[in-house]
Amino acid sequence: MLLHEAIAQILSEKKKPMTTQELADVINNRRLYRKKDGSDIEPNQISARVSNHPELFMRVDGKIRLRG
């Protein structure tokens, strides 16, 4: 699973906007996405991926949500 797919899956399941820290915690706990070196995802990586996919995500009051 790609990182943006993991983010979308969690937001869809939770049905609420979430912070990058909350998203990173869930992704790391569920091991939905692992970096090549096996280390945990950091919140800044979530933020960067969200910025790279404006067609999927938007920021509202410091939280990430799905578009549509």
Image (spheres, rainbow, N blue to C red):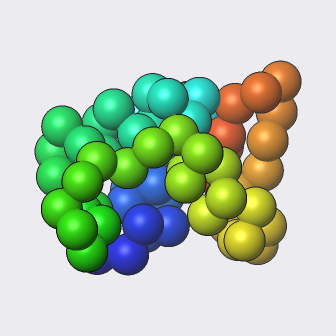
Residue 68, quarter of picture: bottom right
When the figure is inspected, residue 66 is found, relative to residue 51, above or below; the finding is: above
In this orientation, which residue lies closer to the viewer: 33 or 14?
33
User: Which corner quadrant holds the N terminus?
Assistant: bottom left
Q: Residue at x 24, y 54 (%)?
A: 39
Q: Position of residue 6 (x, y in %)?
A: 37, 60
In this orientation, which residue lies closer to the viewer: 31 or 8?
31
Looking at the image, residue 63 sits to the left or right of residue 8; the answer is right
Q: Residue at x 55, y 51 (%)?
A: 46
Res 34 seen here: yes
Q: Residue at x 70, y 71 (%)?
A: 53
Q: Position of residue 36 (x, y in %)?
A: 25, 74
Residue 24, quarter of picture: top left
In this orientation, which residue lies closer to the viewer: 3 or 40?
40
Q: Position of residue 16 (x, y in %)?
A: 55, 30
Looking at the image, residue 41 sits to the left or right of residue 32; the answer is right
When the figure is inspected, residue 11 is found, relative to residue 20, above or below; the finding is: below
Q: Position of residue 67 (x, y in %)?
A: 72, 57
Looking at the image, residue 11 sits to the left or right of residue 58; the answer is left
Give the number of marks: 0
When the figure is inspected, residue 45 is found, relative to residue 61, above or below; the finding is: below
Looking at the image, residue 59 sits to the left or right of residue 42; the answer is right
Q: Residue at x 76, y 61 (%)?
A: 51
Res 15 seen here: no
